[in-house]
Amino acid sequence: MGTKNKFSPTGLNMNRTNKYPLFIWLTLGGMLAYASIAMAADDPFGGGLGRPQPDLQDPNGQSLTELPFGQVPVNTSKPMTVTLKNVGKKPLELTGGKSIRIKDSDPAFSSQSECPADELAPAQICQITVTFTPTSAGKINGFLQIYHGDPDKTTLGILNKPQKEIPLSGEGVSSSTPPSTSTELPNLGQVLAFDVSGNAVTTTTAKFEGGLSVNGGTPAQTVEMTLTDSVKLTGVITPDSTHNAQTADIIVVGLYVPPEKLGVDNCDPANGDYYMMQTVPDNYCNADKSYCKSSPRSKPEISQDYSQIWVKLWDGNLQKLEALYKGASLAEPIQLTTDGVSKGFGPLYEGQFDAKGHLCINFGYRLSDGMLVFNGKTIDVMIK
């Protein structure tokens, strides 16, 4: 009995006793070679180890899944900078800059790269600035694409595909109707910012507006009220321009000082306790069972109102500060008002307070690196 036919990495076994004609093996070998080439064209990394791998990141090194520009007046430009990093094991071929490409149906998006012309070494980073310049009103979408090698190259008719791609979005607005923001809320003055270690950050372009309205009145920064009054706490955050490409947690903290400790400085932490606000967790019930929030599997859904806000004691440790909203895009002003409900936000608080005393309220946002940005002038509420 002859030796079995086999297809090995070193070539075909050409033993005289092969039972199949040579042309069949050559045809089979050609088909396998074509399949390998086709796979390489579709995935030039071949799925193997030690390959280049592009990643698009925000300034804090977090991977981006999108780049939203928000509303931008027509015929004006808004740039946003992202980081390209090769997180793979082999160099990423950039082909004279051709490997970085914008794909859109409208030439409103453009890019400028500071990346090397030839290749990006493993762990190396470079900056790409994407600019949104709408020439007409309306929403515009596109993609930022990163290729390994020439994007116009074909192998056996198969076009090279991008190895990294994130969606771009923006909206051109008429100069006669500027991007929506608050005009009735008080400006809360100088903005404060701290890094994760509690060190002050001296400069920021962020802006905070906010106030408390009583019984449907005009929001104010300083308020006197009674326990029978109905209130609505609202705010608008215009993020620092260098944070536009990031997402953040929305933080709300109130210092409560009881009546017996009221004095000259009612925002002195030594006289009260801090509380943080967060979304009511599933299956939560308050102490007297007068309100319970069911699991998302249960119906009906709880409406957007004050009963969804859970107030929790906070010990002042920044590492333990919990969020009211998570993953908020900083591409445009964050409307913590009724107008923000359509985007997953809403008033910071709505309803009645249940204790006399004094409240000093701060709100802001926390970046993925732990930096905290918040209003420098608190919203002060005296409850009689």
Image: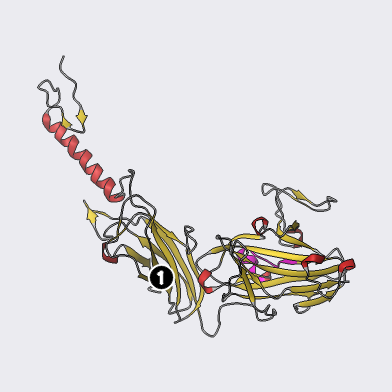
- The colour scheme is secondary structure
Residue 114 visible in the snapshot: yes
Please say if 154 is above or below 208. above
The magenta stretch is 339-349
In which quadrant of the rendered image does the C terminus lie?
bottom right
Residue of label 1:
129
In which quadrant of the rendered image does the N terminus lie?
top left
Quadrant position of residue 118: bottom left
Q: Amino acid at mark 1?
A: Thr
Instruction: Pick whichever, 62 or 200, lies toward us.
Output: 200
Quadrant position of residue 93: bottom left
Q: Across the whole image, how many numbered discs are drawn on residues?
A: 1
Q: Residue furthest left?
A: 16
Quadrant position of residue 92: bottom left
Residue 141 visible in the snapshot: no
Q: Residues within 10 Å of mark 1 (few under 14, many from 20)?
A: some
Q: Residue 196 at x, y = what percent? A: 60, 61
On the picture, is 162 further left or further right than 191?
A: left
Residue at 30 percent across and 45 percent down: it is 46
Q: Residue 278 at x, y = what percent? A: 70, 58
Q: Please, what secondary structure does the residue beneath circle 1 have?
A: strand
Residue at 30 percent across and 50 percent down: it is 42
Instruction: Pick whichever, 239 or 290, lies toward us.
Output: 239
Q: Residue 333 at x, y = what percent? A: 59, 72
Reply yes or no: does residue 187 show up in magenta: no
Instruction: Pick whichever, 347 or 58, lies toward us.
Output: 58
Q: Residue furthest top?
A: 1
